[in-house]
Amino acid sequence: MRIRVSNSDLNASKAELAICFAYHGAKAPEGIRDAKLKRELAAQIKAERFQGRRSDQLLWSSNGRFPARRFLILGLGKRSKSDDQTFRSAAARASRAATKLGAGSIALALPDGKKVDADELGRAVAEGLIHGNYHYDKYLTDADRRPPAVKSAELCGGAAKAALQRGVRRGEKTAGGVQLARDCVNEPPSSLTPTAMANIAKREAKRVGLSCRVLSKPELTKLGMKALLNVSRGSAAPPKVVHLVYKPKSKRGAKKIVLVGKGVTFDSGGLNLKPSSAMFTMKCDMGGSAAVLGAIVGLAELGCKHEVHAILGLVENMTGADSYKPGDILESYSGKTIEVGNTDAEGRLVLCDLLAWAAKTLKPDCMVDVATLTGAVVVALGTEASGLFTRHDEMRDGLLAGAAAAGEKWWPMPMYDEYLSLLQHGPADLHNIGGRWGGAITAALFLGEFVPRDMPWAHVDIAGPAFAESDTPERHDGGTGAGAAGLIRWLESY
């Protein structure tokens, strides 16, 4: 989608669909300067009893009175509750509505730049438009089932054109990282093997100027990543670990930040086999690595003052003849031993080696891991929110602020040390499951045992929002790219 900013009013647009927004209870839409058009739209709002709730929309045919043949008014909800996410969401709905109406070009009237932060508004609207326009149709051969994408969008934004343009450009880069993550999650699991995802990472690294190193099984064996390697034993697809590095233009004041992503490209559950109903969406179990990859690629295009490392742990968890087994005791990179209580609790076995390796060899100032780790976090927070676990208040506050700026829902979760005893039983240092209760917390506590206590570290469990099983007015079903935008925003402000 091509997005441009203009000083034009919506009355002059020749777009196939002209779109404006109205708050709850408003008598006229926002950002309409032409008096004649404003009267026409206000009359339609009154005649149709349009209320302006977030779910409301009103389509009006201009019958040749204006260059645009059709006008769409979308509700914004209450003005008092309006923020950047309000317009990000509204722009996504605008894209979705336009595709359903077959409009290849749209124009949007935005609020007066004097009343809003035009830079942030432009960014939010660009992100929303691109996200709403996304549809994974790579494998559709039936042209009738391919929705007509919006090819161009004009933002009619009044006097703050330069600020809107800056925001739009940043929004396009952020959305690009999210779209990359979505594409990876949506790719069929037999196509997106660990090797295939490593190749995508190499391609993207070359495109945006990141350094990239791919570690294969012999190197991982030499390093001693035994927990990770055990997870991959049942698969014919060899494991890979990808290490991407972004370096800022200036080293002055730069800190070293490590992002770690769980990348189980397909999770059958191993010998503790998942039920068939739960297995269909398990191509999304590499959503953490997808988010981390999308974040560092987007960041490379946006720029950051810190040195950022992204580590993707890519494996399949399958049921081959050499699969690791319940009751096995595994060694790990750190030297700690782990008894396997359930082979479907494999993500923490991948992450524990990566976290310990990164902490020891890279010595970062802080680390964040992202993973579709537990069903327990979905029970706690539902399908729209990610759980944030950390013992470090400054990291918690910064990550929550970054997620909020990106329009993502992250919720702080506890890490009670008393629950650690649930993992400390049996013949090994740790058990890889902690029992029925507090499963998201014990999973986070397990990972914390492989990170130095004095090192700022956070764990983000995106199991809920990583994959949408149904459409909404703002997006199609499938991979959402959850986590990528929140990480980008946090890194920009760190």
Image (cartoon, rainbow, N blue to C red):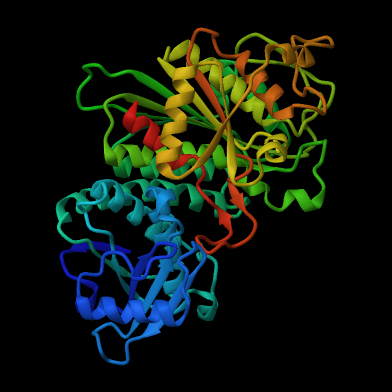
**Residue 206 visible in image:** yes
Q: What residue is drawn where x is 50% and y is 16%?
A: 392
Q: Nearer the viewer, residue 364 or 105?
A: 105
**Residue 402 higher or lower than 187, as above or below:** above
Residue 76, horizontal then vertical, whole percent: 43, 60
Q: What residue is drawn where x is 31% and y is 64%?
A: 30
Q: Nearer the viewer, residue 493 or 118?
A: 118
Q: Nearer the viewer, residue 1 or 98?
A: 98
15 on left or right of 192: left
Residue 323, horizontal then vertical, whole percent: 77, 32
Residue 156, horizontal then vertical, whole percent: 23, 65
285 on left or right of 305: right
Q: Nearer the viewer, residue 246 or 240?
A: 246
Which quarter of the rendering shows the C terminus?
Answer: top left
Which quarter of the rendering shows the N terminus?
Answer: bottom left
Residue 441, horizontal then vertical, whole percent: 68, 24
Instruction: Name the quadrant containing residue 491.
Output: top left
